[in-house]
Image (cartoon, helix red, strand yellow):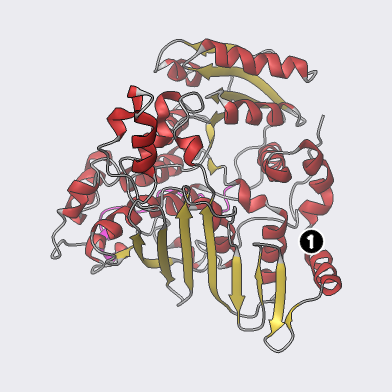
Amino acid sequence: MKQSRKEFLKSAGLAGIGLTGVGALSSCASSQAGPMAGTDSPEELQNGYYKQQFNMSGYAAPALDQVRIGVIGTGNRGRSNTGRFARIEGVEIKALCDLKEQAAQQAIDELKQNGSTHNPEVYAGSEDVWKEMCDRDDIDLVIINTPWHLHAPQAIYAMEKGKHVATEIPAAQTLEDCWMLVETSERTRKHCFQMTNVCYGFFEMVTLNMARAGFFGEVIHGEGAYIHQLISNKFSRSLHQDLWRLRENASRNGNLYPHHGLGTIAQIMEINHGESMDFMVSISSNDFMMRDKAEELAETDSFFEKFTDKTFRGNMNTSIIKTKMGRTIMLQHDVTSPRPYSRIHKVSGTKAMARAYPTPQIGNDYREGWFSESKFREVEEQYTPEITKRVGEMARRMGGHGGMDTMMTWRLIDCLRNGIPLDMNVYDAALWSAIIPMSEWSVANEGRPVSFPDFTSGSWKTNKQGMDIQLEKGGTTRFV
């Protein structure tokens, strides 16, 4: 199965995207067969190649009264995730793993400082020690908080070892790894949950509820983004191990982080649940900032000289997606320019629209403009979903990007403990992550269109509604 997948990807021109870099991508000829040229459809190419083994959409794994957790990666994000999981009923933190033992011990110290009774075993000291943790037979769920390029191999290994997986975004960086996640999840019947916390943002969930109630009419267009000035963050020698995030930006040119802008827009359009992405185009600006920053730092720190000859990603990437039903999605990615933070989150339909930035607004008549504050609050309250009413206040108190991190971790555990389908599955993880290598190819080929693979093998046409924001099932787990 894995060998045939590689052969398929090579024949379609897809293998290695995201690993070989722009030079290899640019060499793709215009006559290249398959999705790379936007000619043959992914469904046609998959005929006789990959047949869905088991539909993970709507799949409910056996209930776990106690969810035993192993954590890989205990840096800043890993420690905060561990602390949130530790405060949910029915969770036992069994093991923590990090390249540096000091980092894992710091996570344990923080648990104790917060009054936690969890006493996890530490795995540290080598690059492959995480495998030893995954080999344990007393872990149900592995949480992955490592550098991006490790997410897919660690998730695949953990599922092979009989564990459910929750990985930070992106779940994968190549189309081959996207397919590997799908095949492994289906075969092992283990969940692969991509921790797209923005899908649990309070206004995002309001707009999702509005869309399902028909408030927008037919949804025509959506916009999302990750606009977040992080240039100092990228060049920090202490924040990221071996400056892995800077290296990503110095080797790949495309939308490297589409999930924050895409997640709820995809759910509003019911992608993978009656709707599907068809093709996309992507362009990037030149780099006007990152190489200059490297040269500036190299003047006083020779360490950065190695980055002064790099071709950094364009400061702004814009990608446009067309769906099978004719809708459009615009995504942007900019982590360098001095712009106010924005995920945009704009939903436009035949009856109304909404946007989240710079401030949440709703409107449904071009003559009246946006709703007044009082009318906005009235509509917001009307469409606030049950999940927010149930745990929103606690989530805000516990924090994590305004509470959406807490909402996400609580709901993941709640689903596993109640034996109900997760709000997001491996097809969402694969599809949303696929935008990364696909945008790279389109950028390297002057914005030419590239067709999406169908990771659901056609089941998107009949899959039922996804994220359960009304808590029709579950919702019984408490905080401790």
Rendered location of residue 270, percent (x, y): 56, 65
Quadrant of image for the N terminus? top left
Residue assigned mark 1: 384
Residue 383 figure quarter? bottom right
Asked if the magenta segment contains residue 49, the reply would be yes
Q: Is residue 209 above or below residue 235?
A: below
Amino acid under disc 1: Thr
Q: Residue at x 83, y 64 (%)?
A: 381
Q: Quadrant of residue 320?
A: bottom left
Q: Which residues are magenta?
A: 44-59
Q: How many marks?
A: 1
Question: Which secondary structure dominates the residues rendered in magenta?
Answer: loop
Q: In front: 159, or 296? A: 296
Identified at 50% across, 36% down, the residue is 233
Q: Position of residue 298 (x, y in %)?
A: 34, 29
Q: Nearer the viewer, residue 145 or 365?
A: 365
Position of the C terminus, as image quadrant, is top right
Q: Secondary structure at mark 1?
A: loop
Determine if the magenta segment contains residue 153: no
Q: Residue at x 71, y 73 (%)?
A: 362
Q: Is residue 382 left or right of residue 204?
A: right
Please state the horizontal and vertical placement of residue 79, each as a whole percent of the image.
62, 25
| x 74%, y 39%: residue | 399
Q: Is residue 59 visible?
A: yes
Across and down, in percent, residue 431 comes to 43, 54
